[in-house]
Amino acid sequence: MKKRLVIFFSVCLIAISAFPSSPKYEMRAVWLTTNWGLDWPSRPIRTASDIPWQKKELTDILDRLQAIGINMVFFQARIRGEVFYASQYEPWATVLSHGRNPGYDPLAFVIDECHKRAMECHAWIVSYPVGSLRQVKRQGNSSVVARHRSWCKQSSGEWFLDPGNPSVKNYLVDLVREIVSNYDIDGIHLDYIRYPDNARKFTDSDSFRKWGDRATDLSHWRENNITSTVFAIYDEVKRLKPWVKVSSSPLGRYASLPGFPASWSCIEAVHQNPKLWLQEGKHDFIVPMMYFSEENFYPFLHDWATSCPAGSVAGGLGIYRLDTNNGGWPLSEIERQIEATRRQGVGQAYFRYENLYRHVGLYQWLGSWFYQSPALTPRCASAPLRAVDTPSDFRVDAGTGGAELSWNPVGEAFSYVLYAADDTLKIDSGDHIVCVLPPKSLSCILPKTYRYYAIVARDRYGNESLPAVWEERYIEPNKYEIVLQ
């Protein structure tokens, strides 16, 4: 066993030493945690004068994420039975505004602000947990437990929606439908879409007797309950807005591997089967919570990368482990993990924002080195292929102080991707992306001049136009090369 581990880690180190250039497509995500106000907000709204301050606190967070190349934000829109948007089903979050209407819509606000920065915003939903005994008591008659007691089970001092109750599936679909219908969201991100950690003690034998399939045992019935809910949510999202992505954050290990036992895994512990969801086309991507190190990280990263479709996995990285109270990992451990995800062809997702920003070494390392060039979020395999018009009248006014670029709008564009190079301009290379701009941007100023420029329009599905190309006029004809996709 030890010999095999040495060989495995040696291969990882060799791979990292030959580090690749920046990929064109790569998920670079952050979980923005609102539960208990861990990342935002730092205090609830008490009067109307607190609204601008709370908004600025959020835009400052997004500015910092944009500055280091993050292209996707999981905004925790539903915590445990409370929400950060106007809902007909659940109350406003206490941590936001003491359970009252805050005077603005945080979900609409964060979506708009993410889009201004050409970042995707995904509504992060805590699925089955609905609060501790204290939280449920504080919510009073507005709590899910008070309103739908027969749907709920208590386990280890926490309340959970019962996945085996058909009404619970319908309720979660209703919550998702409300968000997708009312907001310009880019994705629905399902958290805790599984049975509780101590699933063996979960008291659902009555539900199994009432709704269970006699052809399956309890374990398979539970797995089918979770899968059925995921499928129903996916189908409803795509019916409403087919460009909205559906993802989840399963446990970091799918199942035990030969020589690497993993009791806390998707299949063996909490009855979730994310690989099946991907295989059946009912998920656009997954973000396994890989908050482990060494033999509990690398073999399982390899398993996810090699058994799931390309572009459908981002490694959930436990950067909170850098904190002295949560493991005190050295930065080098996280750097190796981040580099390994790129070598394996999967993206990165960081849990959570505060741990990313407050660890100056990690924040600077990402912004100045690992994410030197922007990257595009991968196009989903289920997305329809559509033609996108090339931006017309692409103009470059280059001078000693930089270059000003402008172009005409493309109706279906959700973002514009600018490329530039001094020699061969490669449209298929992430190294030549200089910036990604939102759809309302029709000009850009670059502090540096290049010989060649190109612009591509990208729609909400990830389809890209052919590039509009500009080259310095004094270059002799046929003395430059543009490499297209």
Image (cartoon, rainbow, N blue to C red):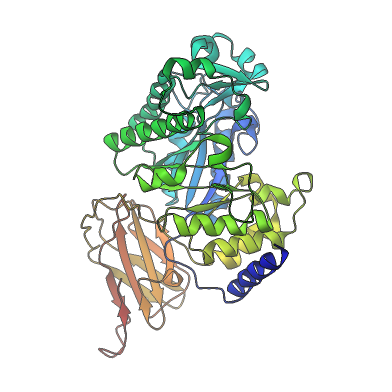
Choose between 128 and 208: the one closer to the eye.
208
Q: Is residue 480 above or below residue 107?
A: below
Q: In which quarter of the view is residue 133 placed?
A: top right
Q: Can I make out residue 46 in this image?
A: no
Q: In which quarter of the view is residue 108 placed?
A: top left
Query: What residue appears at the point 43 percent right and 76 percent down from the top-left corner?
Result: 449
Q: Is residue 46 above or below residue 372?
A: above
Choose between 47 and 99: the one closer to the eye.
99
Query: What residue appears at the point 65 percent right and 62 percent down from the top-left corner?
Result: 335
Query: What residue appears at the point 36 percent right and 35 percent down from the top-left corner?
Result: 231
> Left or right of 309: which side holds 67?
right
Tally of numbered discs: 0
Choose between 456 and 246: the one closer to the eye.
246
The residue furthest front is: 215
> Left or right of 115: which side holds 61?
right
Query: What residue appears at the point 52 percent right and 56 percent down from the top-left corner?
Result: 303
Give the percent coordinates (x, y) of residue 400.
Answer: 45, 78
Give the percent coordinates (x, y) of residue 121.
Answer: 45, 43
Give the percent coordinates (x, y) of residue 5.
Answer: 68, 64
Q: Can I make out residue 452 in this image?
A: yes
